[in-house]
Amino acid sequence: MAKQGAVNTDFAKGGQFRLFPQFDPTAVPQYFGCAQMDGAEQSLGDPTIEMCPSSTTPNTWDIVDSTPTAPELGSANIAQKMDLYLRDKWWDIKRQACEFPLYLTMGKCNKPDNFDSWESMIVISGARLTSFGLDGTLNPSTGGDNATISLTLPISFKEWYPIRPISFQEYGDATVLADILDGLYYDVVNCGTCDVPSDGTKRLYFLAQANSGSPGLSSQVIRTINGGSTWAAIDIPVLGGTSANRLLAMGGRLMVLSQNLGGYAWSDFTDVDAGTVNWTAVTSGFVAGKAPRAGYVGSSFEAFIAAAGGYVYFVGNAGDAPTRTLTDGSLSTQNLNDIHGVARTIVAVGDSNVVLRSYNNGDSFSLVVGPAVGVNLTCVWVKDRNFYIVGTGNGKVFRTTDGGVTWTQLSVPQFSVINDIRFYDDFIGYMSVEVSGGARVYRTTNGGVTWDYQTRIKGLPTAQRINVVVPNPFDPNVLAIGGRKTIGGDGLIAVAR
């Protein structure tokens, strides 16, 4: 890097990039050494302007307002030298007409054909061929036209963003006095026209375990509303001196799920942000002994609550009692530990290898044979109707691409426990694990096929356990974590950027 004030010579160069399409979501992205890409661009939408006649000058008009418009699909051009025996994968992609991701890895010192050896990366999601052609003369009439033939492959795509190495910084040390159990971001990106300007990473909330050193003190919410500059704790007295389990954000309200309470507590985010203790307990509608342990919010009017004894409840509005019991222990009586979903697919996992799945937004569930007989399943992430990733209490990670008919164990090191798995999107995900008496955080950039914990993730504080990974919903390079430093010791909050 050049000195400050000098010309910066550390520029990205085209020859430092390599193209890796991922046509199979269960396989490592493929190296395409004889493919090149150019012309990548995406219109972010020209605003529509509103004008009124000028009050000062005839025959002129003043722009008095502008309305943002939606971004368009991106576009780029790929050229691939064509194989003599027509074995190019692009012929199959043309026939299938499927979407796929593209990864542009970059670096000065990395091994170009190794996908996991990147120094930075551009992820292109939702790519699709928009045309298919041959560039060159076939059966040339003169030798002067004889040249290598290339496939011309214009694409459209939905989104693209950079992935960079990230480094952790610990926060709130004086405030975090107990094990951190769960966390979430609740923020919006705005330019300051309606509120304090934010990039979507300012408001972060964690759930702390009840502090054994302060008898009678319940779980607390530890929060920052300014990106970590200051932190504050707010008590939840309605928990009655006990610990809660999980946090949910639903329709402007923060829900604290608690098996000990036998239901959940809720408060408006405005009160939590102001430090106002204004919690309401909701226990009606929950069966005794079948209380909440985890939750998934599908929308501002759909929360699915996984509970003890194989129960799953539906809550239509934060503050209301459950309106439906979706499963009542007839499929399984095991405690459920996590629940996640996408679209109309909902999957809950629990003790003794239990997997409950719904294809109709919870109207009915079925019992699926899990990946590890007799083993507790600790966490689940759902990509689509049939693709799920599950972590276990004995430190293994499994994937299914057929809705649980078959399971594949992922090739990761042997861990003690998988505590949490959460994704930013279909490709960028994070996993917290325990191994050799300590904690690690892993990242995947290819939908869970491969995972890395040390090459491009730096500064992880020493911890005995990391319970939760919280990807920021607006930036794939921002990750918050929560856990505990030592057995019986203080809790831990850190953010990587």
Image (cartoon, rainbow, N blue to C red):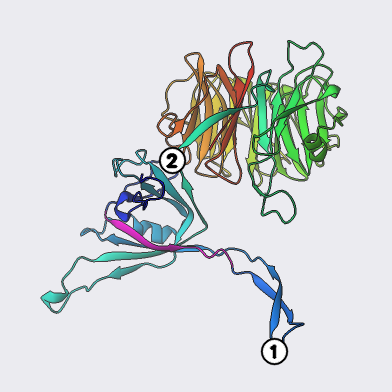
- The residue tagged 1 is 59
Residue 173 placement: quadrant:
top right
SS class, disc 1? loop
Q: Label 2 neighbourhood size at 10 Å, few (<14), some (14-19), many (20+)? A: some
- The mark closer to the camera, 1 or 2, is 1
The label shown at residue 26 is 2
Specify the amino acid type for callout 2.
Thr
Give the camera-side residue of 142 and 19. 19
Residue at x 77% of width, y 12% of height = 214
Residue 201 magenta: no
Residue 375 seen in the figure: no
Residue 40 magenta: yes
Q: Provide the residue span drawn in magenta.
A: 34-45
**Sequence order check, earlier mark of 1 and 2:** 2
Residue 457 in the image: state x and y as whole percent: 46, 32
In the image, residue 82 above or below residue 62: above
Residue at x 46% of width, y 30% of height = 458
Q: Residue furthest bottom?
A: 59
Residue 131 placement: quadrant:
bottom left
Specify the amino acid type for callout 1.
Asn
Determine the CA span between mark 1 and mark 2: 63 Å
